[in-house]
Image: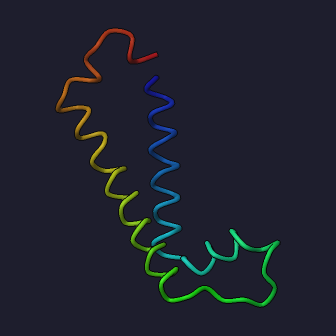
Amino acid sequence: MIVWFIILELLLIGMGLFALLRPTDMWRLEHFLSVRGGEPTDFYLFMTRLGGGFSLAAAVALPIFLVLNGFFSEPGVWW
């Protein structure tokens, strides 16, 4: 289970960084088949950066929360 948790954390951090640092590329990835020559709005860029920031915060806060509540000290968690 800990392996899946680490994989999930790495994916969450990667997606959060991508959304925070490259929102225009995120828009192109989402709309590469439906829009030709379009550009994202400023609102989209802001909301994508905001979502990336929230997912980075969740990726940092979740392991801290689980450690403080003793989740990893339960038997059977490590496999």
The residue lying toward the viewer, choosing from 7 and 62, is 62
Outermost residue, top direction?
Answer: 75
Above or below — where is 51 with respect to 59?
below
Residue at the spot 45% in from the left edge and 55% down from the top edge: 13
Left or right, 79 with reference to 54? right
Residue at the spot 36% in from the left edge and 61% down from the top edge: 54
Outermost residue, left direction?
Answer: 68
Above or below — where is 28 with respect to 72?
below
Above or below — where is 45 with respect to 54?
below
Above or below — where is 16 with respect to 44?
above
The residue lying toward the viewer, choosing from 7 and 41, is 41
The residue lying toward the viewer, choosing from 17 and 30, is 30
Residue 38 in the image: state x and y as whole percent. 72, 89
Where residue 63 sits, quadrant-wise, is top left
Left or right, 7 with reference to 52? right
Residue at the spot 47% in from the left edge and 84% down from the top edge: 43
Left or right, 36 with reference to 23? right
Residue 8 in the image: state x and y as whole percent. 49, 41
Residue 18 in the image: state x and y as whole percent. 53, 67
User: Which of the colour schemes (rainbow, by chain, secondary structure, one colour) is used?
Assistant: rainbow
Residue 15 in the image: state x and y as whole percent. 52, 59
Count every numbered label the image shows and give the total: 0
Residue at the spot 69% in from the left edge and 76% down from the top edge: 28
Where residue 24 sits, quadrant-wise, is bottom right
